[in-house]
Amino acid sequence: MIADRLYERIAETGPVCLGLDTSPSYLPPGLAEKEGGEAEGVFAFNRAVIDATFDLVACFKVQIAYYEALGLRGMKAYADTLAYARSKGIQVIADVKRGDIAATADRYAKAHFTGDFEADWITVNPFMGMDTIETFMKQALAADKGIFVLARTSNPGAADFQYQTVEAPTGRRNPLYLTVASRIASIAALCIGDHGYSAVGAVTGCTHRDEARAIRQILRACFLLIPGYGAQGGTAEDVASYLTAGNGGVANASRSLLLAWREGEGGAAWFADRTRQKTLKMRQEIQLALIEAAR
Amino acid sequence: MIADRLYERIAETGPVCLGLDTSPSYLPPGLAEKEGGEAEGVFAFNRAVIDATFDLVACFKVQIAYYEALGLRGMKAYADTLAYARSKGIQVIADVKRGDIAATADRYAKAHFTGDFEADWITVNPFMGMDTIETFMKQALAADKGIFVLARTSNPGAADFQYQTVEAPTGRRNPLYLTVASRIASIAALCIGDHGYSAVGAVTGCTHRDEARAIRQILRACFLLIPGYGAQGGTAEDVASYLTAGNGGVANASRSLLLAWREGEGGAAWFADRTRQKTLKMRQEIQLALIEAAR
């Protein structure tokens, strides 16, 4: 069961999720030209990064927007990236944030759980309501896949709607994202694996540590996909506050890891080694923060 | 300016939007085989439908999920469909419902406003907040494109979050979708064309006619993309209640028009002609409802 495999993997490697949100502007000079084009360069870059890091990470996340932006060849690079990462036995989260009426959600599920764009988990957007999320969940269960539902995102505009105060089922008033979290928890409960975690997880930005306890309390059985580490300002201590005994979530970093080759000396020649070193450092930082938090 | 061109087109043809949400299961028998595959069959079907209806419709809408579900060849059929419809001089709405943090929204805008997947309008999801929507809006303005922001969708689950009662800026309490609509209106005001309509529109399902007045009052300068006609239960009278003097919105029908060939006698031989007849009928129904509503 997918959630059990992710749990075991996190227990083994720690909770780092490396985000292959690869803009052509991130490539070392000459790589795109050598590979025959931007999209081909992006895949060559990803392949080298995957080779250099797959033993260190819990999973990879691939942000599809960066590939859609490169058109049909970009979509080929996307498919190739997913297939290459999965060929290493590592789970891949397709960060697609899809959401639509049930009949359409069904098509998106087919797109991202099977065929050219097959991933292990996808991110989904709850705005249209639980009928859309339930469709994704049913398709995920049938294919032994998982979903991460957006609950509280890490961007400044998250406040606009996710923080609107609404009436909770209990009669108390709370921010909308907690109501979303409660609804996620209720369907997550339908597909919990042997290790106590569900194939339905949630996306929760890590930049607001004060919210971690309330979110974790509602989403006990959910893996949290925690964006915002590094470039977006999240720290190892923030991440640790969202985890339970070092498991139950993955912390994603993309730009800060992919662009490690621009820091320090030595140039771009060993770009993937630099990403490896930075990924190791992120893993260690989180391990230290977890030890500190457990005291 | 894109909004002016859409206004003039609606004034000329009426507000029918034909949805090319083409499932391979909608194709007449033999078409996919003849064309060499499901994705190729879908494009051949779309091309025939576009040829048979482009003089009748305000615009086409293409639901990308149906193409993503067919993998890389599906994405080719998607690109081909957009290009073919646009080659007729007709605007195309890419129903992609994307939404992400600003840097990623920027990539999605590049994907759907330029290159292989270039469309005229895209649908976007506001859940993550206005910073994400503003990114789409800025990119749309730069490229003379437009966006439709989800406000109130037509599926049953819309009630789950869009109907949560929140505090409006005025201090009154209202459903979340009206708060979303108010925020849409405030950015729509920044890009209004000569005819009084904006390059920022909104998606509002037409199955709740009692809501039409409140929505229209807030979104005076916004085109409304009105799904739900036909297969989802919306009627011509419902659509009329959302329009202003017959303009200011488009009513989408997909399945009911694409599957016209399954109704009545004559079989599948003239499938696109059947879609044409049904599209004409939808147009007439809405025209009659508009005349009735104007009395």
Image: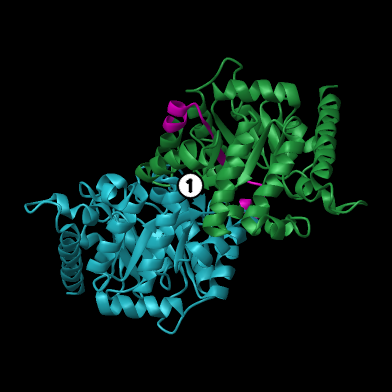
Chain colours: A green, B cyan
- Where is the C terminus of chain A found, in terms of image quarters? top right
Look at the picture and state if A7 lies above or below A113.
above
Mark 1, other Cα within 10 Å: few <14 / some 14–19 / many ≥20: many
Q: Residue at x 38, y 45 (%)?
A: A104
Q: In this rendered view, identify the residue nearer to me: A191 or B185.
A: A191
The residue at the far left in this view is B265
The residue at the far bottom in this view is B194
Q: Is residue A206 visible?
A: no
Specify the amino acid type for callout 1.
Phe
- Where is residue A58 shown, x and y percent of the image? 69, 30
Q: Residue at x 91, y 51 (%)?
A: A266
Q: Quadrant of residue B121?
A: bottom left
Check if residue B252 falls in the magenta segment. no
Q: Is residue B259 left or right of residue A183?
A: left
- Where is residue A52 shown, x and y percent of the image? 77, 37
- Where is residue B140 shown, x and y percent of the image? 53, 70
Q: How many marks?
A: 1
Q: Is residue B208 left or right of residue B134?
A: left
Q: Quadrant of residue B133?
A: bottom right
Q: In this rendered view, identify the residue nearer to me: B152 or A233.
A: A233
- Where is the N terminus of chain A found, in terms of image quarters? top right
Please give the residue where the numbered disc 1 appears in the rendered image.
A127
- Where is residue B147 shown, x and y percent of the image? 48, 65
The chain ID associated with circle 1 is: A
Q: Secondary structure at mark 1?
A: loop
Q: Is residue A211 left or right of residue B249?
A: right
Q: Is residue A104 visible?
A: yes
Check if residue A144 falls in the magenta segment. yes
Q: Residue at x 44, y 76 (%)?
A: B2
Q: Residue at x 21, y 62 (%)?
A: B237
Please provide the residue range marked out in magenta.
Answer: A138-158
Q: Quadrant of residue B217?
A: bottom left
